[in-house]
Image (cartoon, rainbow, N blue to C red):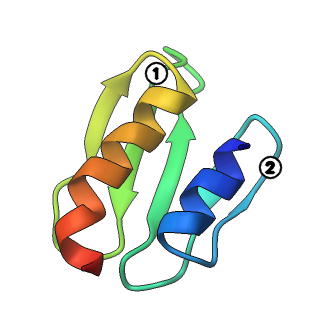
Amino acid sequence: MTDLETLNSFVPGWSEIPNGMMTNPHDAGGIIDCTFVTGEWFVIFNDDRPMRDGFATRKDAIAAFIEAARPQVR
C-alpha cells in the first residue's frame, strides 16, 4: 500500500506531490511535509491539535498523524 493509499484508507481526501507534501482539507485531515533546511518531516492538523515535528521520514510523520488522529475520526 502506498503512503497516499494508507492515509486515504484512514481519512479520505488526501492528495500529494510524489515523495513530498501531502494535504487533506477534511476536518480530520491536515498537512504532512518536510522542511527545506533540515529535511525533517512535520504534521499540521486541521483542528486545534498542536503541530508535531522532528520526524526523520515521511512514513514516520504519517504514522504520527494516524496515531494522533485516530480518536478524532472514530
Locate residue 52, reporting x and y percent. Answer: 26, 42
Quadrant of image for the C terminus: bottom left
Q: Is residue 52 above or below residue 72?
A: above
Secondary element at image label 2: loop
Q: Please give the label number shown on residue 17.
A: 2
**Type of the residue with mark 2:** Ile
Q: Is residue 58 above or below residue 9?
A: above
Asked whether residue 3 is in view, the answer is: yes
Q: Nearer the viewer, residue 37 or 74?
A: 74
Locate residue 35, reporting x and y percent. Answer: 52, 29
Choose top left, top right, bottom left or bottom right for residue 63. Answer: top left
Q: Nearer the viewer, residue 51 or 70?
A: 70
Q: Identify the residue under disc 1.
A: 40
**Type of the residue with mark 1:** Glu
Secondary element at image label 1: loop
Q: Residue at x 43, y 28 (%)?
A: 60
Q: Residues within 10 Å of mark 1 (few under 14, many from 20)?
A: some
Q: Residue at x 44, y 72 (%)?
A: 29
Q: CA distance from mark 1 to mark 2?
A: 17 Å
Q: Residue at x 56, y 58 (%)?
A: 7
